[in-house]
Amino acid sequence: MRIGIEVSTACLREPTGVAHYARCLAEAHAAAFPDDQLELLVRLSRWRRRAYLQNPANLPVRIYHGPWLRSPWLRPELVHGTEAWLPPWKEPARVVTVHDLAVLRFDEEWFAPAAFRARKRRAYEQLRDAADLVIVPSEVTRQDLLELFGYDPGRVHVIPHGIEARWRRDAMADPAVLMRHGLEPGFVLFVGRISARKNVVRAIEAFARSPGARERMLVLAGPMAVGGELVNEAIGRLGLANRVLLPGFCNDEEIEALYRAAGTLLFPTFYEGFGLPILEAMACGLPVVAGSRGSAPEVAAGHAEIADPMDVDAIAAALDRALAMGAERRAAAIAHARGFTWERTAGATRAVYAEALAGR
C-alpha cells in the first residue's frame, strides 16, 4: 500500500498533541507494516519548518503545493490528513482525522474568536464531502460530527490514540529534572498548554482551596498560550507565586520525570477530543482529576476523579479524593491505561485505509 501521511501541522518547534499523534502513528505503522510505502507530506507553506518534524522512522518527507506533489511515486494510493485537512487531490483515497470540535462547543469570544470558529465550520463542512472515511479518537468527537455537521455515521470510525512504551514501563523519576526545578515528589501536576481554553485558571483556584494540596506545589508544565495572562493574574491574586511553578515547554523526558514524581494530575479541562495526559499519567501510577465534559470521562472509564470544570469547589474536592486514592484503584487505572498502544491504533487505522481503498 502506498500511503501519504499529511503532517504539515506537526512541523512545530514545540510539538502539540496533534504532532505527537502524527509521529507515533507513522512510527507504529512503519514498524507493523514494513511492506507498506509511507511518505510524510508537507505543504509548501510549512516546508521551511520541516526541520522541526519529528520523524524517528526516517520516512521520506515530500513537499506539495495544491495539485503538485514532488515524489518519485506516480502518486500515493491513499492520503491521510492527520489534522482535519486534506490536500486537494481527487485520485487517491482520502482519510482524515478530526481530533475535537471543542471550539464549536463554546460560543464565547475568549475561547475562540468568531472568525476562527467560522473557518473551522467551513473546514468540517468541506471534509464531510471530501473525505472517503473519517477517523476520530473518541465517541464524543464522533457524535459531535454527526450532530453538528450531519456526517454519515458509517463513514466515521472511532480509533483511540495509544500511549508510548515509556509510559507502560516502571521507572523512577529522573532526579536531575526535579533538582533543576527545585521540586520535591508529591506535587500537583498539570500537563498541556497554559491557556484559558484549558481551564487552567479554575485549576489554580481549586488548588488554592484544596486542603489536601496545602503543603504541595502546583506545576503547570507547558508553554504559555491563549489567555496566559489570566493564569498569571490568578497566581498573583491568590498569593501563590511561591507555590506554582511554570517551567514552560517540557520535552518527553521531562514530562516523564514529572509524571513519575507527582502526587496527582490535575486536568479539569473544558472539553477534550481525547486527552492523552489522562492515560499517560494513569500508566505511571498517578491519580487523575479530569473534567466531566467532552471525552475525558470516556477515556478515563471510571478510573479518574471527575469534576464539573465550571465548579471550582467540585474540582477542589476531586483533587482531595485523588490525593487520597488507594493502591487498588491506582493499579486498576494503570491496567486500563496500559491497554492503549500505538500498535493497536496503527492496526485499526490501516484497516480504515483498506476500507477506503476498497470503496474506490
Image (tube, rainbow, N blue to C red):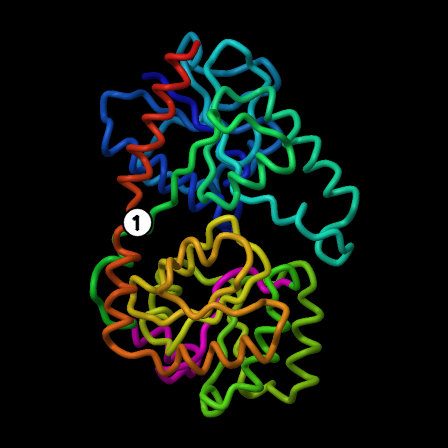
Q: Residue at x 43, y 53 (%)?
A: 298
Q: Percent x, y for residue 77? A: 40, 13
Q: Nearer the viewer, residue 335 or 217?
A: 335
**Residue 11, visible in the rendered structure:** no
Residue position for label 1:
340
Q: Quarter holding the C terminus?
A: top left
Q: Percent x, y for residue 2? A: 35, 17
Q: Nearer the viewer, residue 347 or 9?
A: 347
Label 1 crowd (10 A; few <14 / some 14-19 / many >=20):
many
- Is 48 placed above or below 192 here? above
Q: Nearer the viewer, residue 18 or 281?
A: 281
* Residue 117 figure quarter: top right
* Residue 84 figure quarter: top right
Q: Is residue 100 left or right of residue 71?
A: right
Q: Percent x, y for residue 15? A: 49, 49
Q: Which residues are magenta?
A: 174-195
Q: Residue at x 30, y 51 (%)?
A: 164
Q: Percent x, y for residue 269? A: 56, 62
**Residue 162, visible in the rendered structure:** yes
Q: Is residue 177 magenta?
A: yes
Q: Is residue 219 magenta?
A: no
Q: Amino acid at mark 1?
A: Phe
- Is 104 placed above or below 204 here? above
- Is 124 placed above or below 79 here? below
Q: Is residue 345 left or right of residue 130?
A: left
Q: How many marks?
A: 1
Q: Residue at x 22, y 67 (%)?
A: 171
Q: Quarter holding the N terminus?
A: top left
Q: Circle 1 — which element?
A: loop
Q: Residue at x 33, y 40 (%)?
A: 56
